[in-house]
Image (cartoon, rainbow, N blue to C red):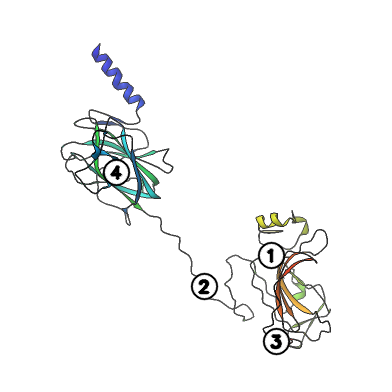
Amino acid sequence: MKKYSRLLFMSLVVAFLSTVAIHGIPVLFAGAQSAPPSSALPPNCTPAQIDKVGASGYDAGNDDTTPIKTLDKRFDTRWSNYGVGSFIQYELKSSDTICGIDISWYRGDVRTYNFIVSTSQDGNKFDNAFFATSSGKTNSLERYIIPDSTLKAKHVRITVNGNTENQWAAVTEVQILSQSTPPPVTPETPPPSKDVFGVTKIYADKPNGEKWFMNMVDPTHDPRYDPKTPLKKNPDGSWKVTDSQVRMNVFTSAGYDESKIQTYDQSELATKGYMEAPNDWKNIEMTGYVKINSASDSDFHFTWYGRGGHHGDTPCEGTAYKGNLNKDGSSRFAKEQWHSGGYSFTPTTNVINTPIVGK
């Protein structure tokens, strides 16, 4: 009857403990791989910085067996706890690729330990990384390579399932090895280039970004350009606007379709980042060559702007940033909220200090 009870007890231990050792033989679970001691580390595998250490328990009657003793770089101190399934757990400073772990065992030259290393990102759910048995030949650090070369973790746990002498878990030193994720490489900004007219750009073109250049041969048949007025070609190849006041439009490759505008609410537009389509004009560099032949209106000016649509009372698509160049040579910027009363202006400055009529 006693023999039967002992066998029943041992079967219950196997059923309810995640990992156990019976007479030094580990009971293994799916997902864990065997990791024999080795010293062949992958490139750039270095000691990880450990922020915290804890354990399932320790020998309360011996102050030298607290978990922190495994990080004091001394082999005459240790963490120890009695019982199959005792574990010690480390939290790393950052979540890195774990490539190996060094462990030195108390009385590691006369006994072998059965253990499992498991890892976690959140410190709650742990997955087995590998199981192993210590060599039983040394009190120094033994190295174990992580079989999964892509394993990332912030928490590392060592679960000890007894040893060949008793059921004590006893570790003197631990060193976790990791490959830190290199910082992202910021691509170098290419030097400024020239546009099709030979003008040096202030900024390089955005990859796959929108761009447009006026067709100097036949601008009137450009589907992306709406001058709103007849154009007359000058002898030098430039084009003359035949009206005294005009608002020319240039569209992105998506064109302009007012029916696709879902909202005019400024806060919603700011959240979306566009009005009609994701490739709406924004963060643009605009260059224009113009000449004032004559201007009687004292308020005559050129205005370059983007991020605006049809102007009207209700609704209004005027949400542009505008740069004004006045005929007296002065300039200013404006942020448009609606046309025509919703503007915020910067102070007017005059760097040129001379009118630009005829220039």
Q: Nearer the viewer, mark 1 or mark 4?
A: 4
Residue at position x 67%, y 71% from top? 212
Q: In the structure shown, which secondary structural element does the residue marked by tag 2 occupy? A: loop
Identify the residue shown where x is 66% and y is 65%.
282
Q: Is residue 240 above or below residue 131?
A: below
Q: Which mark, by number, is residue 171?
A: none
Please name the residue shown 16% across and 40% down the image.
109
Find numbered disc 3 in the image and state the secondary structure of the residue it sits on. loop
Check disc 4 and report the residue beneath it.
68
Image quadrant holding the C terminus, namely bottom right
Residue 194 falls left or right of residue 281: left
Q: Earlier in the sequence, mark 2 or mark 3?
A: 2
Dot 1: element: loop
- Label 4 CA crowd tier, 10 Å (few <14, some 14–19, many 20+): some
| Residue marked by disc 2 | 190
User: Dot 1 corresponds to which residue?
Assistant: 253
N-term mark: 1 or 4:
4
Three-letter code for the amino acid on which mark 1 is drawn: Ser
Work out whether mark 4 precedes mark 3 in sequence or the reverse, and give the earlier one: 4
Determine whether 56 is above or below 96 in the image.
Answer: above
Callouts 1 and 4 close, C-beta under 8 Å: no
Within 10 Å of disc 1 (Cα), the crowding (few <14, some 14-19, many 20+) is few
Which quarter of the figure is the N terminus placed in?
top left
**Amino acid of disc 3:** Asn
The residue at which mark 3 appears reads as 353
